[in-house]
Image (spheres, rainbow, N blue to C red):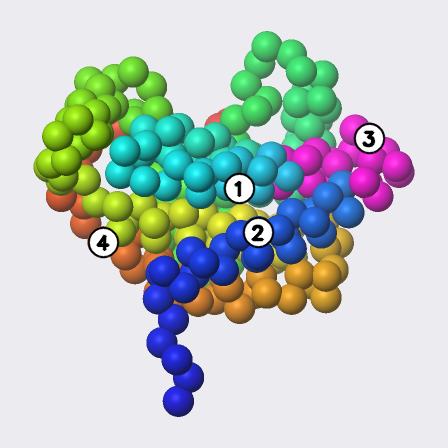
Amino acid sequence: MSPVVTVDDLLRDAPKTLDQLTGEIFRRTHEAILVDATSQLTACLQLALRSASILSGMSRVLDLATLDSFETLNRASIEARDLLMYFRFDEKGIRERVGYWFAGGADNAWKADHAKVDEFLTKQGAVGIQLASNWSKLSVLAHPTKYAADNSSVIVMHRMTGLLNGLNIPQKRADYVVGVSRLIMAVTCDLPSWIPLGLNEANMPSVQSFSQAAEAIAAPIVDAPVDNPLPPHSIRSPKKKP
């Protein structure tokens, strides 16, 4: 009988898995830059590197006393990952947006069309992804809104008094594990309409088994109802870009 894998086991294995993934992304990024430093492929790989780099730092603040820092980094990692998936579409319009992104102008080329990615992944059979909805919720808690300030107050209260008052560290630990898994899927899945990234899975032997275990064990914990959900009026409805 195979041993039961837990979220704690996945957290222990996450650094090794993330190192393998980051190393292979870095190798491919170097190759892509040598060919064309401003290509669609290079943009996707650089965004993957950013997401992986932030995930590496997130593990250091995955604690009840530092959940504010974890949440802020989490949003940044997710933004990079979601834009990577958006930039993978093999479309002329996407390549034009990649050009705007490389130009570094003051437009919103850095923001993914979450509704477009959601619709595409759903058609590919993905269940419960909801990038647009999740990004909207993260936005509420990453900016200095009333709800973000409430969360910070609870976190500081815990740090000052030791009281938990609704803080759910098991769900955040599972959230981190799932974050690593979703980046793995974003860079290793070669779906129709996406450009291939060309990663060699032989150079990262742990990533697929880690991702499969994370989706089976940690994802249901992340998807469980939270004790104090955000009210519907605080979340912007996702809209697909024209």
Which residue is located at x 34 percent, y 53 percent? 174
Q: Nearer the viewer, residue 163 or 36?
A: 163
* Residue 120 appears in the rendering: yes
Q: Which badge, 4 or 3, comes first in the chain's sequence? A: 3
From the image, state whether disc 3 or disc 2 is nearer to you: 2
Disc 3 + disc 1, Cβ < 8 Å = no
Disc 4 + disc 3, Cβ < 8 Å = no
- In the image, what residue type sits under mark 2? Leu
Which residue is located at x 22 percent, y 53 percent? 224
Magenta range? 30-48
**C-alpha distance separating marks 2 and 4:** 25 Å
Q: Which mark is residue 37?
A: 3
10 Å neighbourhood of mark 2: few (<14), some, or many (≥20)? Answer: many
Q: Which badge, 1 or 2, comes first in the chain's sequence? A: 2
Give the residue at mark 1.
Answer: 56
State the residue lying farthest toward the top.
Answer: 106
